[in-house]
Amino acid sequence: MTANRVLIFGAAGHLGLPVARWINYRSPQTLLRLATRSDTSKRSLAQQFPKAELISANYLDASSMAEALADVTAVFVVTPDFLDEERAMTNLVNGARQSKNLRTIVRIVGNLPNVTPANLTPELRDFGGGTATQHLLARQILDASGLPVTYLNMSAYLMDDLLRWGGPIREQAALLMPYERRVAWADPAEVGEAAARIILSEDSRYAGQYFNVESGQDIFTFKQVAEILSDVLHYPIAYDDSITRWLETVGPRYKQLFGPKGADYYLEFYRFEQLHELAVCTSSSLGMLLKRTPATLRSWIRANAASLSPVAASSTKS
């Protein structure tokens, strides 16, 4: 019998790492092939998973993908923003077809419920990539492949996004987010665990399923999120939807991460989310996959309060 070998892309990330941890915990005999292109991440993964195979894999290189996919039984796929999904998923499909023992692919996507390419604004289409378009394209390619793909659609913000936005929260006691709107929330560790549970289940009925994964409980505007932060941190956190302040404070970071047009793209994407905020809804899918009630945003903030508390709050308490 062929040993189970699971390939995890983005293995050091906030979704891939929980997948690896859960599989290693529940099925230590399963072989892990962990993909990351960062030497620093490889060293960290080697310490956490000494028996794992560590590789560098390039979505855009066909030979690299074929090598990464060789002899695997399952694959976890998460892709970075602005990736050329047509090329990447074509390489994935071609490589996966050569892996004779492959039984499942779990793919992370991020689409608002019921939003189709026809709903996209001309401005988003003109960018030629990005969150609003790339996941729709990826699904088209994977669906057409006939491969056993399960989709986990994060129709939500990840709770640890608050850590990435944490600079203004800690330094200015302010949550900055243009285009006030309703959004759902999910704990990335629980999304990763759900993916791992699907992989370990070996239940072929997951193939072709599309699950909206969020807490099933929380839909908040960003003003409401600021109020929750205030209550948990015991310090008033203001909500500011000023585009100017966001561009001045957060814009440089977005340009660093996503290129010169990164900030402009996300402003347009946030506006798009506002236009379609009525599509935001909760489901029971994540709870069903986890076999328990998922974490709430309030409980997650409480558990991570030390990383979010404003500097001024510390000086006040002292």
Image (cartoon, rainbow, N blue to C red):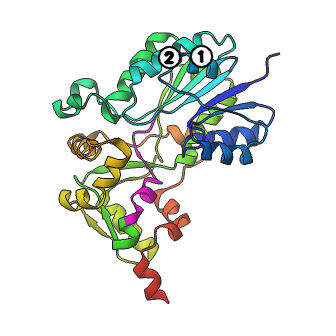
- Decide if residue 52 is on the left or right side of residue 147: right
Q: Give the range drawn in magenta.
A: 153-167
- Residue name at image x 53 percent, y 70 percent: 306
Residue 160 painted magenta: yes
Residue 66 circle label: 1
Q: Measured from the top left, where is residue 87 in percent x and y?
A: 42, 19
- Residue name at image x 39 percent, y 65 percent: 167
Q: Is disc 2 in contact with disc 1, using a CB cutoff of under 8 Å?
A: yes
Residue extending farthest to the bottom is: 318
Distance between mark 2 and mark 1 Cα atoms: 8 Å
Q: Can residue 291 be seen in this view?
A: no
Q: Earlier in the sequence, mark 2 or mark 1?
A: 1
Q: How many marks?
A: 2
- Residue name at image x 36 percent, y 61 percent: 225
Q: Which of 314 and 261 is in front in this view?
A: 261
Q: Is residue 167 visible?
A: yes
Q: Measured from the top left, where is residue 13 in percent x and y?
A: 55, 44
> Is residue 43 shown above or below 246?
above
Secondary structure at badge 1 equals: helix
- Decide if residue 40 is on the left or right side of residue 46: left
User: Mark 1 belongs to which amino acid?
Assistant: Ala
Mark 1 neighbour density, 10 Å: few (under 14) some (14–19) many (20 or more): many
> Is residue 268 shown above or below 4?
below
Residue 158 circle label: none
Q: In which quarter of the image is residue 123?
A: top left
User: Mark 2 belongs to which amino acid?
Assistant: Asn
Residue 165 painted magenta: yes
Residue indicated by mark 2: 91
**Which image quadrant: the N terminus?**
top right
Secondary structure at badge 2 equals: helix
